[in-house]
Amino acid sequence: NAGVMQNPRHLVRRRGQEARLRCSPMKGHSHVYWYRQLPEEGLKFMVYLQKENIIDESGMPKERFSAEFPKEGPSILRIQQVVRGDSAAYFCASSPLGDGRNSPLHFGNGTRLTVT
Amino acid sequence: AQSVTQLGSHVSVSEGALVLLRCNYSSSVPPYLFWYVQYPNQGLQLLLKYTSAATLVKGINGFEAEFKKSETSFHLTKPSAHMSDAAEYFCAVNRDDKIIFGKGTRLHILP
């Protein structure tokens, strides 16, 4: 009974490169959330997706960041032309229902992105 | 809009002492509130959640939290701290079908 799987665990990119972060939700979960964590700042909501749909992307920067959750395969968080300020831990969470109340989130172990 | 504020980014307690981590919420309607714990290099795990069924909520690892509407608080407590409780703790609230987290409180346990 695998939990939420994120890969890679660590990702190093040079400024200007692209970063692709992958998240496979728990079996049976069709709702995926992405959060970014910086030291002393807690987790910041980025985007909420269901299969083939972006439900809420109010926390996503308008440029360079995109997310998808295709019908088949993992959810992908894509950061184009990375800058040093993108260095952070990115966490994916999934839930069976998207009501945010009765369906607690199950988190992956995160991807730590370092931009050099 | 619903949000939570955690008082104290770092809290230190001696092993065996009472743990108290503070969280205040702002919400125009009765909120759903959560406490999550994060151990080093891991994702967050749910400790407990408040869904209006009972004001005193018991969670895993001996933690509990009490919802106090008059104080708009949802503080996390544990009677006796253990070394394994050292971690970062996040209070959270639901808003528009997503979970919004506080900035976290890092709990240090002194031997």
Image (tube, rainbow, N blue to C red):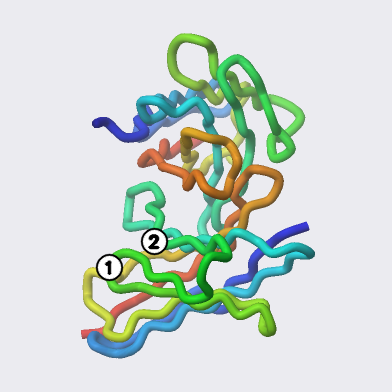
Q: Label 2 marks which chain's residue?
A: B
Local SS, label 2: strand
Disc 1 vs disc 2: Cβ atoms closer than 8 Å?
A: yes
Residue A75 percent location from the top left of the image: 50, 22
Q: Of residues B67 and A53, which is closer to you in this image? A: B67
In this view, A66 is above or below A38: above
Q: Residues within 10 Å of mark 1 (few under 14, many from 20)?
A: few
In this view, B31 is above or below A115: below
Residue B75 percent location from the top left of the image: 51, 77
Identify the image quadrant of residue A53: top right
Q: Of residues B39 and B35, which is closer to you in this image? A: B35
In this view, B44 is above or below A97: below
State left or right for residue B98 relative to residue A115: right
Question: Which residue type carries mark 2?
Answer: Leu
Residue B56 percent location from the top left of the image: 47, 76
| Residue at image point 23% right, 88% down | B16
**Circle 1 residue:** B61
| Residue at image point 67% right, 83% down | B71
> Which quadrant: the N terminus of chain A?
top left
Local SS, label 1: helix
Identify the image quadrant of residue A80: top right
State left or right for residue A8 relative to residue B66: left
Q: Are marks 1 and 2 on the same chain?
A: yes
**Circle 2 residue:** B47
Residue A41 percent location from the top left of the image: 58, 59
Question: Which residue type carries mark 1?
Answer: Asn
| Residue at image point 60% right, 41% down | A99
Q: Of residues B105 and A83, which is closer to you in this image? A: B105
- What separation in Å lies between label 1 and label 2 (alpha carbons)? 8 Å
